[in-house]
Amino acid sequence: MRFTAYQLTPILVFLIATQAIGSCLPIGINTLATTSTVSGKSTCFTQYLKVSVVSENIKIILDQPTNQTVVTETLVELLQLNSNLSTRVNGGQNTVKDIYSIYGQLCISSEPDIAKRSKTIQVLTHGDTLDHTYWDIAPGYSYIDAAVEAGYATFSYDRIGVGKSQHPDPLQVVQGPLQVEIAHAIVTMIRDAQIGPYSFRTIVGVGHSAGSTVTQGVTTKYPQDFDAIILTGTSISPSFVNTAIASFDLTIANLDASGKFAGLPNGYLVQPNDQSIQFPYYRFPNFDPQIFAIEAANKQTQTFGELLTLGSIVAPSLQFRGPVDVLLGENDLVFCGGDCTKPQDQSALVAPSFYPAAGHSEHYIVPGAGHSIFAHYSAGKAFAQMIDFLKASAI
């Protein structure tokens, strides 16, 4: 457990709901617990949100895999040259409507006067096979601490199908479109209600990897949600993604030696060992083995539903006009094949391609970092650039 002490606090009423057309209803009462970041520098409030969503998913014409042989063959057919699997299994629109439990954590300054002055909150959306702990790995490797120290609040959460959040059907429910609707619901809650004793005027969307994809999906469908965005671990090129996914060596999660995924349906998948985590995410010797061990222990699931649908939520956001920041690890294998400086700075291409109407934009190649930027020695440089970007954007 990351949290060693919980103190019950008063019940909080959340007004939260969403559907494809974006309306809201009051639906939930959530109790909070107080804790802190790993370093103890920031105060955090943990919560379970009851999120009502209507999502236009895709009906996937596949059964839950019966064994690992079926999983491996499906991945081969998905990743092979000129694959048409996504088209073959697309059964058209599938409307998903339900209330889901989403785990989240609001962090803010431990100094009451500073906390009251924090009017900007950053919504942090993690990548695939990770969870909310990516944003607070260890002292010195905590973006949450960096943001809070700079005067911001943060809200990190476990995406649906991950960590402490609910784990519904991994084929028909846990898909890219639903991730977008849930992220939108969280923003709606922040816009229309209060989290604890705090309210916020400005919301920044911050994503990593697939979390950046989800953030992009929100800016495309709901361009007014975020006042600014920071995308990390993403580029305009999908050329190397299949190589990275193959290196995950994805296996049925409920068979994982850790035992922490026992009972999940076979459509939940996981990286089985350290090698399948290091290969796509890290660049040796530019990381601390102890930090790697923490991240490996915190590994999380991926679903077949996401693998088949995440690409469907990526499109240029012609109406988003806020500031855009893009960071890539210099040696990101997933989105750059291991060198994000060739044939030109790949981080510089994202904003012009996806956000032609954006205001102030910046980009940054994080020296020596692999895909998991915040787990490398240069994480602090990434944090500093992100905070400087927000300040330069008057946020």
Image (cartoon, helix red, strand yellow):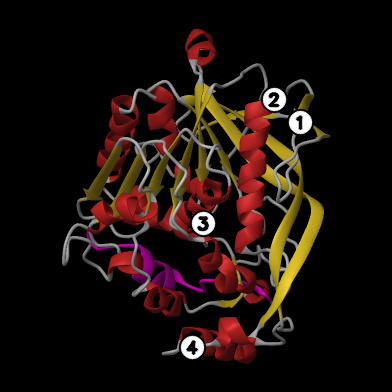
Residue farthest to the top, as pictured: 113
Sequence-earlier tag: 3 or 4: 4
9 in relation to 386, above or below: above
Residue located beneath label 3 in the image: 130
Residues under numbered marks 2 and 1 in contact, where contact means CB atoms less than 8 Å apart:
yes
Residue at position x 39%, y 24% in the image: 395
Residue 15: image tag: 1
SS under mark 4: loop
Residue 193: image tag: 2
Residues under numbered marks 4 and 2 in contact, where contact means CB atoms less than 8 Å apart:
no
Which segment is the magenta one?
A: 267-285
**Amino acid carrying mark 1 in the image:** Leu
Indicate yes or no whether the magenta region holds residue 82.
Answer: no
Residue located beneath label 4 in the image: 83
Q: Could you tell whether 315 is left or right of 90 in the image?
A: left
SS under mark 2: loop
